[in-house]
């Protein structure tokens, strides 16, 4: 695999940007600006919302979005602003999805996006019906962030990735991680700090009583050291759990085909009477 395969200069990324151009939306209630990419697919088979990780922008999901485009999905990628807490973030999510006329959708949440997904499941006021939730490399508490913020101002955002990750990165994940870090360097520091503050505002995500519309994808090659109870596959009843051998923290970058195949198979069982 060449480094050009993870690049904003690649033909694949350029095509992605044409189909889903980068746009902004202002949540006037909380005075926060969202960056997003929305594709418009003719005769869409459904809408998929991608919520990237805490250190990511919309670009890191381009390979996954391309797979979704190819199968006729309408795709909305949201780059999360610096909200003070999850409750304000949920209001912002509802505001932007309502404005974009996203009435129902499947969600893919990576890392922080997976954490947020559990609050979306618990919310009673959303305009958008969430048909299914796919949690990728996610965990349900914020203990790690309680311990790891003081150093942030001492180094670069790239240092933050290293600080919060195990030291030994498997060679097969290095190019994907390098790409994620290259995009991290385009995210303003106050946004990263704000996301961490938002996550820290809730020590633990709410656990649904019935997780039958949850798919949990957990790579086994590279992961944070967590207690079993921190992992959603140990906490969410009736969820479908898939463990994949490769992917690390970013399987939506490093192992897109396998992630997508599991997602596509899972959501086939969920339909909606509401137009997507």
Image (tube, rainbow, N blue to C red):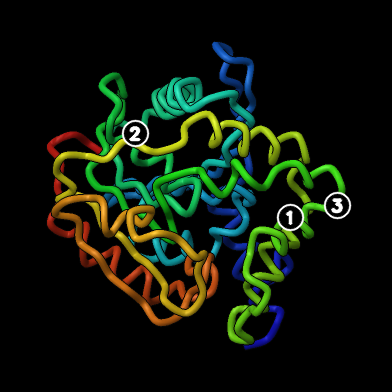
The quarter of the rendered structure image containing the C terminus is: top left
| Image coordinates for residue 128, horizontal then vertical, percent | 30, 29
Estimate the spatial distance between the alpha carbons at disc 3 and disc 2, rounded to whole Å.
Answer: 33 Å
Q: Residues within 10 Å of mark 2 (few under 14, many from 20)?
A: many
Which image quarter: residue 178?
bottom right
- Mark closer to the observer (3, 2): 3
Estimate the spatial distance between the alpha carbons at disc 3 and disc 1, rounded to whole Å.
Answer: 7 Å
Residue beneath label 3, please? 155
- Is disc 2 placed on a helix, strand or loop? helix
| Residue drawn at point x = 59 percent, y = 50 percent | 58
Q: Is residue 264 left or right of residue 41?
A: left
The disc, 3 or 1, on the residue closer to the chain's N-terminal end is 3
Q: Residues within 10 Å of mark 3 (few under 14, many from 20)?
A: few
Residue beneath label 1, please? 160
Q: Is residue 172 left or right of residue 241?
A: right
| Image coordinates for residue 257, horizontal then vertical, percent | 40, 76
Which image quarter: residue 67?
bottom left
Residue beneath label 2, please? 120
Q: Residues within 10 Å of mark 1 (few under 14, many from 20)?
A: some
Instruction: Tell me whether circle 3 and circle 1 mark residues in contact (CB < 8 Å).
Output: yes
| Image coordinates for residue 121, horizontal then vertical, percent | 28, 35
- Is disc 1 placed on a helix, strand or loop? helix
- Is disc 3 placed on a helix, strand or loop? loop
Instruction: Tell me whether circle 2 and circle 1 mark residues in contact (CB < 8 Å).
Output: no
The quarter of the rendered structure image containing the N terminus is: bottom right
């Amino acid at each position: 695999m060449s480094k050009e395969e993870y690049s904003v200069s690649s033909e694949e990324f350029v095509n992605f940007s044409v189909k889903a151009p980068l746009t902004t939306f202002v949540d006037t209630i909380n005075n926060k600006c969202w960056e997003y990419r929305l594709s418009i697919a003719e005769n869409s088979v459904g809408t998929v919302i991608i919520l990237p990780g805490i250190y990511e922008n919309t670009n890191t999901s381009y390979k996954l979005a391309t797979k979704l485009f190819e199968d006729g999905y309408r795709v909305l990628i949201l780059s999360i602003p610096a909200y003070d807490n999850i409750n304000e973030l949920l209001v912002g999510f509802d505001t932007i999805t309502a404005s974009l006329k996203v009435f129902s959708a499947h969600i893919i949440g990576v890392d922080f996006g997976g954490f947020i997904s559990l609050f979306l499941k618990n919310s009673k006021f959303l305009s958008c019906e969430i048909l299914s939730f796919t949690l990728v490399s996610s965990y349900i508490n914020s203990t790690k962030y309680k311990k790891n913020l003081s150093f942030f101002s001492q180094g670069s955002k790239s240092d933050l990735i290293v600080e919060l990750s195990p030291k030994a990165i498997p060679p097969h994940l290095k190019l994907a991680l390098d790409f994620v870090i290259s995009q991290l360097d385009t995210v303003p520091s106050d946004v990263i700090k704000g996301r961490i503050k938002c996550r820290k505002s809730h020590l633990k995500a709410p656990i649904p009583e019935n997780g039958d519309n949850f798919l949990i994808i957990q790579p086994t090659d590279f992961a944070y050291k967590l207690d079993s109870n921190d992992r959603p596959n140990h906490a969410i009843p009736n969820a479908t759990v898939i463990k994949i051998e490769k992917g690390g923290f970013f399987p939506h970058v490093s192992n897109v085909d396998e992630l997508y195949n599991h997602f596509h198979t899972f959501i086939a069982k969920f339909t909606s009477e509401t137009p997507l």
